[in-house]
Image (spheres, rainbow, N blue to C red):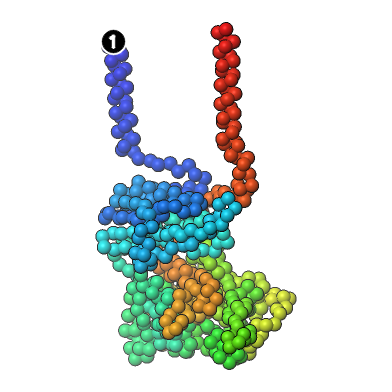
Amino acid sequence: MNKKLQHIAFAFIGLILINYLSNAVYKRFDLTQDKRYTISDVTYKLLDKLDDTILINVYLEGDFPAEFKRLQTETRQFLEELKAINSNVRFRFINPKTIRERLIKKGMMPSQLTVEEDGDLSEAIIFPWAEISVGKKTELVSLLPNSLAKTQENQLQNAIKKLEYSFANAIHNITKTTKPKIAVIAGNGQLEDIQLYSLLTELGKKYRLAKFSLNNVATNSQKTLTDLAKYDLAIIAKPTERFTEEEKFTLDQFITNGGKSLWMIDQNYADTDSLYNNGKMLAFPRDLNLTDLLFSYQVRVNNKLIQDLYSAKIPLATGNVGNQAQFQHLNWFYHPLVNGNPKHPITKNLTPVRFRFATQIDTLKGNLKKTPLLVTSVLTKKIGTPNFVELQSIAKQPIENEFNSGPQLLAVLLEGTFNSAYKNRTKPFNTPLFKEESKANKMVIISDGDLAKNQILKGKPHDLALDKWTGEQFGNKEFLINTIDYLLDDSGLINLRNKTVTINLLDKQKAYNEKSFWQFINIGVPLLLLALFGFGFNYLRKRKYS
């Protein structure tokens, strides 16, 4: 009896110990092949710093297509992982049916989906959004971001891949106490504020922006450089006037002192507006006096225009019906549509980017790491300048043999230690900030100044991501935002865009064709087996006890 009591006591103590250890040592196991539920170190660090309660409202609730219930499930499971790491994370799923107008006013636009069920097509409206709140601060998260996807299934897969990045980026934005500062360089005929409105409005949500003129460098060079050095990044968007040596030196020393930079350079005078006005224009080289500066960063922006058979459309009047002009949207080879580098987080799953009268970039040998971001198709043609560009050439049938120049580099990322262009040269002015080379730094150079230029519709700036004439969607805004995020991201957050998740999607056509067969397998076969078991059991029972 005593031994039995001892065994019971040991078993009881063992259960208490196991229960204590299970609570003290917490571990979740991700058994998926692609480790989709494994939270990255970057997100772990974000959650470790989270001391305040963070509330996440997810508007993926209600009736919507079956495949998008997968997005709901994946979102719920991901948020449960975040909550398991930090109990300050709280979330709830809300049906947006009764609050649609309120969500739209907040900027959460609905998505219209095509639903295929039993061979019939119908439309469905969903709100693929989440809203993160910390105190009085809120941040919106798009759960169905725009991407290069031919089908809804591929769009869904891309959305699930971006779940961690979307939430981690929003949490980072809402919890950070200081915002990086961006200088929009002016003074050399750069794009006007209204032409950059679409991009700058989006950037202003998470960065501090200021217009910075280089005009004062001639009279107060030292102060201009000191003031510019306080910024984290400089945007040089389509300068049209020649840079002085003092201005170049200021930008050069901004870079060697650790400033990131985004260059959008037009090496030719070529503009779509002047082409529409006259039907013909002379494209000729523009002297910005930047060749030696960019050469020291191991890059050369050429002045030969690039034509690409894979191009965007422009509207063109093709006749009249009554008093109404008839327009057609025709491919304009001087506006290449360029796909992004699928292996880099800036451009992965990016909608094609539209260029306008772009030129080609050469990279030179050196210590810098050079990553191509945007490269044309192989069906390109180089047009030397000066040269006339005629609008009527759009009607000519292209001769494919002439488009044999191969892929052309239009945007490149440079990373590493940058040497000053004035390392072994006379300096325009003396400064205690002078450095011959930088520490580890980053820079992006794009051979089109109009990449960030939004159109104007009825006197108001139009969305950079959409063409006002054709309604076609482009990746210009997303590319530039991703680029700036990458240049200013010291935590590696944007690398989460490279996360790969494999979603096994149902073949709808095959499922519809084999519907009856699988219904029989799932319903008829179990009933048949149950009947056979019943008859067999009764037969054996009667035989045994007869």
Side of 380 relative to 245 (left or right): right
Side of 386 relative to 256 (left or right): right
Percent across and percent down for residue 455 are 48, 80
Q: Residues within 10 Å of mark 1 (few under 14, many from 20)?
A: few
Task: Write the residue at 50% across / 84% down.
Answer: 290
**Residue 449, placed above or below residue 158:** below
Q: In terms of depth relative to the viewer, which is nearer, 240 or 260?
A: 240
**Residue 524, placed above or below residue 329:** above
Task: Write the residue at 52% across / 71% down.
Answer: 473
**Residue 411, placed above or below residue 176:** below
Type of residue at label 1?
Answer: Met
- The part of the image, by quadrant, that contains residue 384 is bottom right
Q: In terms of depth relative to the viewer, which is nearer, 368 or 526?
A: 526
Quarter of the rendering occupied by the N terminus:
top left
Residue on which disc 1 sits: 1
Q: Which residue is the extreme one toward the top?
A: 546
Side of 87 relative to 449 (left or right): left
Quarter of the rendering occupied by the C terminus:
top right
| Residue 407 visible in this rendered orientation of the protein | no
Percent across and percent down for residue 48 are 32, 52
Task: Write the residue at 30% across / 21% down.
Answer: 10
Percent across and percent down for residue 391 are 62, 86
| Residue 204 visible in this rendered orientation of the protein | yes
Percent across and percent down for residue 234 are 41, 77
**Residue 338, placed above or below residue 150:** below
Task: Write the residue at 32% across / 49% down.
Answer: 86
Secondary element at tag 1: loop
